[in-house]
Image (tube, rainbow, N blue to C red):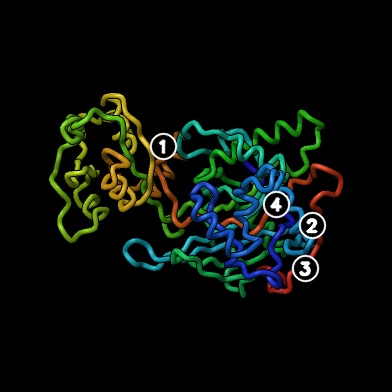
Amino acid sequence: MPRFRPFPGIRYDLARVNLGDVISPPYDVIDDRERARLAARSPYNAVLVDLPVDEGGEDRYAVANRLFSSWQAEGVLVRDGRPTFTVYRMSYRDDAGVPRHTTGVIGALDLRPSGADILPHEETTPKARSDRLDLLRACRANLSAIWGLSLAKGLTDLLPVDADPVADVDDDEGVRHTVWIVDRPEVCDAIAAAVTVQPVVIADGHHRYETCLTYLAERERSDGRAGDATATLAYVVELVEDELTVRAIHRLLNGLPPGFDLVAALEPWFEPAGPPPAGVPVTAAMIDAGALCAVLPSGEVLLRPRPDALADARDLDSARLDVALASLPAHEVTFQHGPDNIRRAVETGEAQAGVLLRPASVAQIEATAHGGERMPPKTTFFHPKLRTGLVFRDLGVRPTEGEGGARAARHAAPRAGSK
């Protein structure tokens, strides 16, 4: 089983910055406008190193390394005095307005080829990995965490969330982010042991995980100095219904022949069931009807799967739709979350049509993991998204001697699991 262990985290000195001003969403959900907004909040916002841009003739990876090193030299970023775990809770309301939370722990997860102990839960789409690899090479640090799901039962109960947190901030999206630092050895040992006894399913960050494996192989080939590159920064959450909100990732279609009748073309696999009822959220209507939903310039149509025609497909909307789309004329499929985003794309002509899917359940994710299978690409969207900047992890080998060394520091704020 993969080792999961505490490490001396590199963190913002909260006497120098407001955490809400410097954390950012994951790099892959940030567009140019959002990046500019985040960068304007603080000259130390994590987006400046996790999603760098060229600056004054300096390429973006050199910019990231320079900033990450200078923030440490200035004392804006400080290093824990000993190994720690970071307990992290995201509190929010779900689509029905019910209060929910996701509680997990950030630590160092050993890198292993995907197999019996590290389990990707869905297939990945081809994607250039050079950007994240170049960033790793430049900064030699894990800047953002992958999201892992632990099959270990009882992990949540080990996370000390009754103590005063070191930080508690709201973002612009209705999510409250609460952080505790755990450094008491016996508490750390219990958390590490719980995660180590069961496989970890990669929920989000498949490409980053694979990039870290590539980087580790590079380090071992180049000079044998892997340092702490044998592990990666990971946020691990127990795979239970109470701690997870899973949303669907929907499909946008382009490139079909002009005037193409999508509903008729899908009819061998999906029975048209009319428009969603007025006044009912489309996601609720889909669940009530046991259906997907086509979003067209002319309106929306519920599509109920035909069990006999889809008998060989996995019990997932993404798998069923893949079967049907394979029969259509050549076309392009892109992915988007949120029904309103799909509607907007169709209304503006950005897409010819969209198809809304129902989310996979936690039970389906767990069954897939235990069966050693993978879901189709872009099946799940875990909500909310982790914030980058809560803690960074040094990989132990610097590009040049002494470059970017962080000063050891003790946090004055109380730590969960500390004496």
User: Left or right: where does residue 419 sit relative to residue 158?
Assistant: right
Q: Earlier in the sequence, mark 4 or mark 2?
A: 4
Rendered position, 352 above or below 331: below
Mark 4: few/some/many CA within 10 Å (<14, 14-19, 20+): many
Instruction: Kindly identify which residue carries mark 1.
Output: 375
Q: Are marks 1 and 4 in contact (CB under 8 Å)?
A: no
- Looking at the rendered structure, the kind of residue marked 2 is Ala
> Label 2 vs label 1: CA separation?
41 Å
Q: Tell me the mark number nearer the camera, choosing from 2 and 3.
A: 2
Q: Quadrant of residue 212?
A: top right
- At x 51%, y 38%, the residue is 120
Q: Earlier in the sequence, mark 2 or mark 1?
A: 1
x, y percentage for residue 26?
A: 54, 51
x, y percentage for residue 198?
A: 57, 45
Q: Which element carries disc 1, helix, strand or loop?
A: loop
The quarter of the image holding the N terminus is top right
Total labels drawn = 4
Mark 2: few/some/many CA within 10 Å (<14, 14-19, 20+): many
Q: Quadrant of residue 115?
A: top right
Mark 3: few/some/many CA within 10 Å (<14, 14-19, 20+): few
Residue 308 seen: no
- Looking at the rendered structure, the kind of residue marked 3 is Arg
Instruction: Kindly identify which residue carries mark 4.
Output: 393
- Looking at the rendered structure, the kind of residue marked 1 is Met
Q: Tell me the mark number nearer the camera, choosing from 2 and 1.
A: 2
> Label 3 vs label 1: CA separation?
43 Å
> Label 3 vs label 4: CA separation?
16 Å
Q: Are marks 4 and 2 in contact (CB under 8 Å)?
A: no
> Label 4 vs label 2: CA separation?
11 Å
